């Protein structure tokens, strides 16, 4: 959110098939469309040198995938961003 004040919302819900959906939303500036396809790439960052390595979302992506889940984003410039993490039921995660 660029160091400005804002709101971050966390929510969770159980899915019908027993999985879990987690949402992390903010009312920040949003992520430009031309950047959205790269944000999970290792070392990709829009921050100035020395202010980030570009590994946070890449590592998060790997952790979610290792647990059999998915992570995606919905973002609109000027409105905010939501990251949606979907995890399978425990039995399905252990089989993956």
Image (cartoon, rainbow, N blue to C red):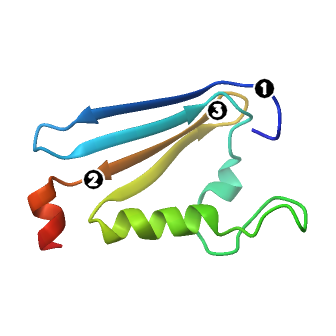
Q: Quadrant of the N terminus?
A: top right
Sequence-wise first label, 2 or 1: 1
Marks 2 and 1, how far apart in space?
30 Å
Marks 3 and 2, how far apart in space?
23 Å
Q: Quadrant of residue 7?
A: top right
Of labels 3 and 1, the one closer to you: 1
**How many other residues sit within 10 Å of disc 3, few (<14), some (14-19) or many (≥20)?**
some
The image shows residue 40 at horizontal and vertical percentages of: 57, 65
Which residue in the protein does label 3 denote?
A: 80
- 42 sits left or right of 49 in the view: left
Mark 1 lies on a secondary structure that is loop
Sequence-wise first label, 3 or 1: 1
Which residue is at a point 12% across and 44% down the rendered structure image? Answer: 18
Q: Is residue 49 visible from the viewing direction of this image?
A: yes
Which residue is at a point 31% across and 49% down the rendered structure image? Answer: 86
Q: Is residue 61 above or below residue 74?
A: below
Which residue in the protein does label 2 denote?
A: 87
Which residue is at a point 73% across and 29% down the rendered structure image? Answer: 78
**How many other residues sit within 10 Å of disc 2, few (<14), some (14-19) or many (≥20)?**
many
Which residue in the protein does label 1 denote?
A: 5
The image shows residue 22 at horizontal and vertical percentages of: 37, 41
- 91 sits left or right of 60 in the view: left
């Amino acid at each position: 959110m660029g160091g400005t004040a804002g709101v971050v919302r966390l929510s969770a819900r159980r899915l019908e098939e027993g999985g879990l959906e987690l949402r992390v939303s903010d009312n920040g500036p949003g992520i430009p469309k031309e950047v959205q396809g790269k944000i999970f790439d290792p070392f990709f960052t829009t921050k100035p040198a020395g202010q980030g390595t570009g590994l946070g979302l890449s590592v998060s992506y790997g952790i979610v995938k290792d647990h059999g889940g998915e992570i995606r984003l919905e973002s609109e410039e000027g409105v905010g961003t939501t990251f949606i993490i979907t995890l399978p039921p425990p039995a399905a995660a252990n089989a993956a």
